[in-house]
Amino acid sequence: MRLYMVPAAPNPTKVMLYIAEREASGGALPIEQIVVNTLKGRHREPEHLARNPFGTLPVLELADGRYLLESLSIIRFLETVQPESALVQGDAATQALAYDLERTVELRFANFVGRYVHATNSPLGLPADPQLAKELLGSMSQALDYLQDLLADGRDWLGGEQASLADITLQSALQFARFAKVEVINNHPGLQAWDQRYRQRPAAQAVLRF
Ligand SMILES: N[C@@H](CCC(=O)N[C@@H](CS)C(=O)NCC(=O)O)C(=O)O
């Protein structure tokens, strides 16, 4: 299998951190990782569009040549195809809660961070939009309060004792903000502490560049 990705971009990082977490817990996944340089526009070239007509990353090429185009589907596939040491464990409700929390982080925070970065200090050179940036900061604040409240009982990770998909998605978004030198958790000391903790994990040390 091949993972087409680009370091520091949030959705590819989500899959890269997931793979590294699996490897750190002894579940090595045989996946070659290939960089598609978005800053040079390689994701818009025919070679990548043949894999994914939408031009986005990550893309996972399966052993039979088919492609998965969505980060969470890629993770779901890797959970299923090699279930020993899967990251999401437990009964149906526990597993559903893990995916639920990941979706909350993605849809109520990470999505806004991506747009906020491009509205303030876009790595792609997009024009700044201060009004939109202000609205996006407002949109992410409820999720930040919610995530910080989860940690208030002293747990290390968003879902409890074990780092989970939600932690991976949160860190992927925060790395993107650091990459663009944009601050999004400065009013949330509990999340800042979580951020320092997560970045010490072997998976984080192996994957994160910023
Ligand atoms: N929903 C997709 C989003 C993929 C996505 O938007 N990837 C970004 C990088 S984080 C990308 O490829 N952007 C380049 C573009 O849209 O042209 C996923 O979760 O994989």
Image (cartoon, rainbow, N blue to C red):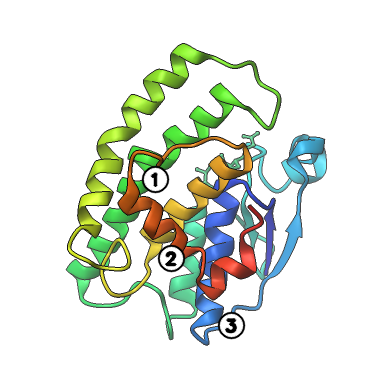
Q: Amino acid at mark 3?
A: Ala
- The mark that comes first in sequence, 1 or 2, is 1
| Residue type highlighted by circle 2 | Arg
Query: As drawn, is 44 to the left or to the right of 17?
Result: right
Question: Which quadrant holds residue 134?
Answer: top left
Q: CA distance from mark 3 to mark 1?
A: 26 Å
Q: In the image, what residue occupies the spot 76% across and 54% down?
A: 35
Q: Which label lies toward us, 2 or 3?
A: 2
- Residue that carries the numbered disc 2 in the rendered image: 197
Based on the displayed image, in which of its 4 quarters is residue 67 positioned?
bottom right
- Left/right placement of residue 66 relative to residue 144 reads right
The residue under label 3 is 28
Residue 167 can be seen, yes or no: yes
- Residue at image location 62% in from the left, 64% down from the top: 207
Depth order, front residue of 66/195:
195
Q: How many other residues sit within 10 Å of disc 2, few (<14), some (14-19) or many (≥20)?
A: few
Secondary structure beneath dot 2 equals helix
Q: Residues within 10 Å of mark 3 (few under 14, many from 20)?
A: some
Image mark for residue 205: none
Quick check: is the Cβ at mark 1 less than 8 Å away from ligand 1? yes
Viewer can see residue 70: no
Name the amino acid, label 1: Glu
